[in-house]
Image: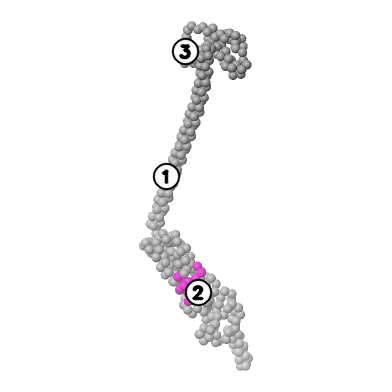
């Protein structure tokens, strides 16, 4: 049978174990505990091993000091231009001061959620639908600034606020699709018109350059033709002058030259005529040959005068054997 003293020792041992257990606290990394003495906050326990006074000091709140994520449930928001949109997002926050987060606000997560929701409606309600769809970064920045200022007294830092989805009504989505299609068709029409315009300009420039080059060619050809005619006229004038001088000196070979030239030209005209015909005409071969011979003797005589050494022919009315 167990004696009374034995029971007393066992009770003391159990109380000692309980006392030691209540006085020893281990705080995990990423957490902080608040300590209350008779219900009043006295200190914060950092991660590690701690000893408190049993039965006097108690653990008040266990605060998570890591960055946490809070989902903002979808809600209806009326924009500045009276469009109803459905919006949801996420909030990233971190507790910086465990004592303030534990004692300055009750239900910290619910408080952050309600604060973010109300400011979300305020910020997005002051913007048009087009601004909501195109300026998400500005919405996130404005929400972050407002909510972070409001939660600073609570010892909480709002690190980021991100809008996940903005869903307009179905009729607005259809209207936006039609508007986008019309805008794309408009741009396509403008681009096509610009292409046609550029093509016409390039074609006109090409025709202009072709006309300029053609005119330049005609001008160059006319210049060359005029120069050739001028050279021909100069040669003809020089030949005429030489023949005239020969006639003035009483040289009959010059007259034979003109007669033979006209005679040969007339025969050439008959030869190149496109009509097919047979022409009978009297022709004295000796006179033609004599005229040609006169031309030859005249040229030799002129060449001899220029060289100063060529002898005059004995019989100007005959053609030399080499010429025959």
How packed mark 1 is, by other alpha carbons closer than 10 Å (few <14, some 14-19, many 20 or more), is few
Please indicate whether residue 272 sits to the left or right of residue 319 in the image.
left
Q: Position of residue 203 (x, y in %)?
A: 45, 39
Which residue does the numbered mark 2 point to in the structure image? Answer: 156
Asked whether disc 2 touches disc 3, contact meaning CB atoms under 8 Å apart, the reply is no
Give the CA separation, mark 2 to mark 3.
119 Å
Q: Secondary structure at mark 1?
A: helix
Which residue does the numbered mark 1 point to in the structure image? Answer: 193
Residue at 54 percent across and 80 percent down: it is 34
Observer-nearest residue: 123 or 190? 190
Task: Say whether disc 2 or disc 1 marks the residue closer to the N-terminus.
Answer: 2
Give the tally of numbered discs. Answer: 3
Q: Position of residue 287 (x, y in %)?
A: 52, 8
In the rendered image, the quadrant that contains the C terminus is top right
Observer-nearest residue: 12 or 248? 248
Colour mode? one colour
Q: Position of residue 232 (x, y in %)?
A: 51, 23
Q: Quadrant of residue 293?
A: top right
> What is the number of the mark on residue 276?
3
Q: Is residue 225 visible?
A: no
Residue at 50 percent across and 78 percent down: it is 100
Q: Nearer the viewer, mark 2 or mark 1?
A: 1
């Amino acid at each position: 049978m167990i004696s009374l003293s034995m029971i007393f020792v066992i009770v003391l041992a159990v109380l000692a174990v309980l006392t030691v257990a209540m006085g020893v606290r281990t705080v995990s990394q990423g957490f902080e505990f608040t300590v209350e003495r008779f219900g009043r906050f006295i200190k914060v326990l950092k991660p590690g091993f701690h000893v408190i006074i049993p039965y006097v000091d108690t653990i008040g709140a266990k605060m998570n000091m890591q960055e946490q994520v809070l989902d903002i449930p979808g809600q209806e928001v009326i924009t500045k231009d009276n469009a109803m949109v459905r919006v949801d997002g996420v909030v990233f926050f971190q507790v910086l001061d465990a004592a303030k987060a534990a004692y300055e606000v009750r239900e910290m997560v619910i408080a952050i959620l309600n604060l973010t929701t109300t400011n979300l409606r305020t910020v997005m309600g002051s913007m048009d639908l087009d601004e909501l769809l195109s300026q998400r970064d500005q919405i996130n920045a404005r929400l972050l600034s407002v909510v972070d200022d409001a939660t600073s007294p609570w010892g909480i830092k709002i690190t980021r606020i991100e809008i996940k989805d903005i869903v307009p009504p179905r009729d607005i989505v259809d209207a936006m699709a039609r508007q986008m299609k019309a805008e794309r068709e408009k741009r396509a029409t403008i681009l096509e018109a610009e292409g046609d315009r550029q093509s016409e300009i390039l074609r006109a420039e090409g025709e202009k350059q072709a006309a300029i080059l053609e005119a330049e060619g005609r001008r160059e050809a006319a210049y060359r033709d005029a120069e050739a005619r001028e050279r021909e006229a100069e040669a003809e004038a020089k030949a005429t002058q030489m023949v005239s001088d020969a006639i003035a000196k009483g040289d009959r070979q010059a007259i034979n030259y003109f007669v033979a030239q006209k005679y040969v030209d007339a025969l050439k005209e008959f030869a190149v005529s496109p009509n097919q015909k047979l022409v009978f005409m009297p022709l004295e071969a000796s006179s033609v040959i004599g005229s040609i011979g006169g031309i030859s003797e005249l040229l030799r005589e002129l060449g001899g005068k220029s060289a100063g050494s060529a002898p005059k022919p004995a019989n100007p009315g005959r053609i030399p054997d080499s010429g025959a």
